[in-house]
Image (cartoon, rainbow, N blue to C red):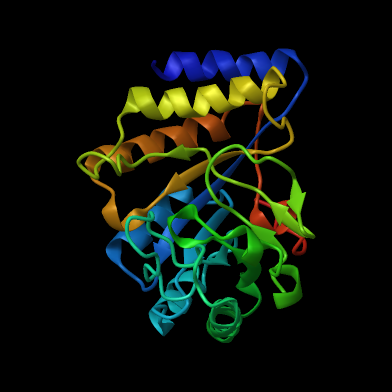
Amino acid sequence: MDWGDLERELDGWAQAGQAATLWWRDDDAVTSTPELQRLLEIAGPLPLSLAVVPAQADATLAGALRATDHVVALQHGFAHANQAVPPNKKAEFGGGRDPAQAARELQAGSRRLRQLLGERALPVLVPPWNRIDLILVGRLAELGIRGLSTYGPRAAAATAGVVVVNTHVDIIDWHGARRFLGLDRCLQLAIGHLAARRQGRVDPNEPTGLLTHHLVHDAEAWSFLAAFSQRTASHAAVRWMGARQLFGCGVERPA
């Protein structure tokens, strides 16, 4: 696939009189780095949601975000520490953990982000490795968490009183060289989810989510992000959405 294929899919939304909604989540933010600054520059006025690791986040992160109007922080677990017992897949809040301890960590993480980032920190959980035990999901609302974001088309817009908005276009090849997934595959993911929404094969109201990890981007990944953000922002059918609106956490500042 190439950029022309994306343009044609977006044209299909325009011809149908519909808005092709998108949102952007970047994981593993903890401190101010050249990579974070590059991410903020590429995003520009587009709404960006940083999944921040509470136990590792420092004051330089808050300083880096102070001048931005369109960046919010989501809670990326607590310490991003794998608590799974082999051969289970990596997870910080998967099955088998003491529910009381898991709840305490989530609450401590929420407090830490609010202290560090103030109103920029939203009560939205991004579980590390995009995995979370269903029993714990049922407790999120009582812990003050209003939103949940993992990976893949959502099964429902809300669960146990928590709004669900996932991501669908992970640009890193985690199962291979841990580098950029490639233009063809990234466009396949983006166009595939957009087309499935337009055709009613998945929830049409869930915006297509771009998932990035600024700390591991190579030159090709940065190039893709710059092109993708520019091409989508300039298309009449596209509407980029922010997490405050998506998760019902207040009013977005206009781009």
Residue 1's place in the image compared with 128, above or below, is: above
Residue found at x 65% / y 48%: 165
Q: Where, by quadrant of the figure, is residue 74 drawn? A: bottom right
Task: Please state if 148 lies on the left or on the right of 187 as rendered.
Answer: right
The one nearer the camera, 87 or 212, is 87
Task: Please state if 219 lies on the left or on the right of 109 as rendered.
Answer: left
Q: Position of residue 12 (x, y in %)?
A: 65, 14
Residue 187's place in the image compared with 74, above or below, is: above
Residue found at x 38% / y 54%: 89
Task: Please state if 189 lies on the left or on the right of 149 as rendered.
Answer: left
Q: Position of residue 225 (x, y in %)?
A: 39, 40
Q: Position of residue 134 (x, y in %)?
A: 63, 58
Quadrant the N terminus occupies: top left
Residue found at x 53% / y 65%: 68
Q: Where, by quadrant of the figure, is residue 119 drawn? A: bottom right
Residue 237's place in the image compared with 123, above or below, is: above
The one nearer the camera, 115 or 3, is 115
Q: Position of residue 108 (x, y in %)?
A: 56, 85
Q: How many marks?
A: 0
Q: Where, by quadrant of the figure, is residue 61 drawn? A: bottom left
Residue found at x 40% / y 63%: 28
